[in-house]
Image (cartoon, rainbow, N blue to C red):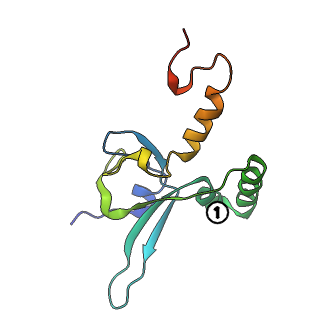
Amino acid sequence: MTMIELVHDVLDMQLVDRARVKMGRVDGITIELRADEPPRVAELLIGGSVLADRVGSWAALVIGMAATLLGVKQRVARVPFEVVEEIGDVIAVDLDAHATDALRTEHWLDRIICAIPGAAGRKGPQK
């Protein structure tokens, strides 16, 4: 059995989906406490609000206010630990990043940027 140190080997590591698309970094970890059994890692969490909670209450307040001002609902992407395939330079998971909430902010920003005249965004260079 391979041993990993959660804080050192998992927290803040880059997550990639099955197509090696970057999903974000691990901002939090959920541990499941079970009666008469050792605790287990249940989920990896991705989201600015999770990171802000780790940094401190002031950061959570700032992120919350920014989300309110921009009209964005804060969501946390939850990646079940069962889908983790490999922990190395990155954490590879058996998911499609676009089918999760992990890229929600990137998709929202992409729509904003693509609306700017002359911006390329994901649509590719303007010709």
Left or right placement of residue 107 versus residue 62 in this view: left
Q: 126 or 78, which lies in front?
A: 126
| Rendered position, 23 above or below 40 | above
Q: Which residue is mark 1?
A: 53
Whole-percent x and y of residue 31? 44, 73
The answer to which image quadrant residue 32 occupies is bottom left
Whole-percent x and y of residue 48? 61, 53
Residue pictured at 48% horizontal, 54% vertical: 26
| Rendered position, 95 above or below 117 | below
Whole-percent x and y of residue 104? 54, 46
Q: 113 or 44, which lies in front?
A: 113
The answer to which image quadrant residue 50 occupies is bottom right
Number of other residues with Cα within 10 Å of mark 1, as a class: few under 14, some 14 to 19, many 20 or more: some
Q: Secondary structure at mark 1?
A: helix
Residue pictured at 72% horizontal, 52% vertical: 67
Camera sees residue 14: yes
Residue pictured at 64% horizontal, 62% vertical: 53
Residue lying at the far left in this picture: please name it: 1
Disc 1 residue type (three-letter): Asp
Q: Quadrant of the N terminus?
A: bottom left
Residue lying at the far top in this picture: please name it: 127
| Rendered position, 117 above or below 91 | above
Camera sees residue 15: no
How many marks the image carries: the answer is 1
Q: 115 or 57, which lies in front?
A: 115
Whole-percent x and y of residue 88? 32, 48
Residue pictured at 69% horizontal, 62% vertical: 56
Q: Quadrant of the C terminus?
A: top right
